[in-house]
Every structure is written in structure tokens, then in C-alpha cells.
Image (cartoon, rainbow, N blue to C red):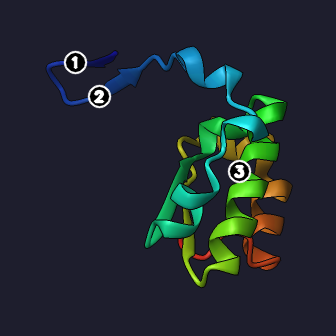
Amino acid sequence: MIFVTPDGERSMNTYLGACIELGPEDVEADKASGAKVTYFEGYLWDPPRAKEAIRQTAKLAHAAGREVSMTLSDSFCVDRYRDEFLELMRSGTVDIV
């Protein structure tokens, strides 16, 4: 949900829903290697098993010469995972932010 006040300030409430169950077993190799760019939300870094799925997907994508993109999601997400996000970029796991 996004609420916008008359002066233009906005507040958001995020619900990850079913994606908190995402794990490596959900990764389809043909999809990961076939997509031109694979994209993931920084919010997906919260559930530990989703991290595994993202890393697995990135390996498959890169092995096929594809790129991996991520969004930082929000400043709180960056605060929580700053060092890990930087490592994803430095290691080449993520190509586009």
C-alpha cells in the first residue's frame, strides 16, 4: 500500500507474501539461463532461502552469458544489507543496479 499526503509525502507498507517461501528448488534453470536479464528485488534478501535462490539463479544466468539486475528496494533494506549488497556488486553476482 502507498499513501500520499496532500503535500506529496508518501508512506509505503510492504508485504512479501508467498515469496518468503522462495528457495533454490524453485529456480528453473532454463528460465534463469534463457532470460536476457534476471531481476530481483532487494527485499528478497530478507528470507535466507531466497538468498540461496538468487545466488543460484545468478550463477545459471552468468554461465549462459546473461546479466543479473537488482533493485535496492528501500533505504531500510540497504541499511540492513549494505555490506552484502556491495559484495554482490563487487563479486559480479549483480551486473545492474
The residue depicted at 64 percent of the width and 57 percent of the height is 29
- The amino acid type, in three-letter code, at marker 1 is Thr
Dot 1 crowding, Cα within 10 Å, few <14, some 14–19, many 20+: few
Decide: is 20 above or below 67: above
> Residue 93's spot in the image, x, y percent?
74, 70
**Secondary structure under badge 3?**
helix
Quadrant location of the C terminus in the rendered image: bottom right
> Residue 95's spot in the image, x, y percent?
60, 76
Foreground disc of the pair 3, 1: 3
Spatial separation of the CA atoms under disc 1 and disc 2: 5 Å
- The amino acid type, in three-letter code, at marker 2 is Glu
Dot 2 crowding, Cα within 10 Å, few <14, some 14–19, many 20+: few
**Secondary structure under badge 1?**
loop
Residue farthest to the left?
A: 6
Dots 1, 2 in contact, CB < 8 A: yes
- Name the residue carrying label 1: 5
Q: Nearer the viewer, residue 89 or 53?
A: 53
Picture disc at residue 9: 2
- Circle nearer the N terminus (3, 1): 1
Picture disc at residue 54: 3
Q: Nearer the viewer, residue 7 or 39?
A: 39
Is residue 61 found left or right of 7 in the rendered image? Answer: right
Residue 97 visible from this viewpoint: no
Spatial separation of the CA atoms under disc 3 and disc 1: 36 Å
The residue depicted at 38 percent of the width and 22 percent of the height is 11
The residue depicted at 46 percent of the width and 16 percent of the height is 13
Dot 3 crowding, Cα within 10 Å, few <14, some 14–19, many 20+: many
- The amino acid type, in three-letter code, at marker 3 is Ile
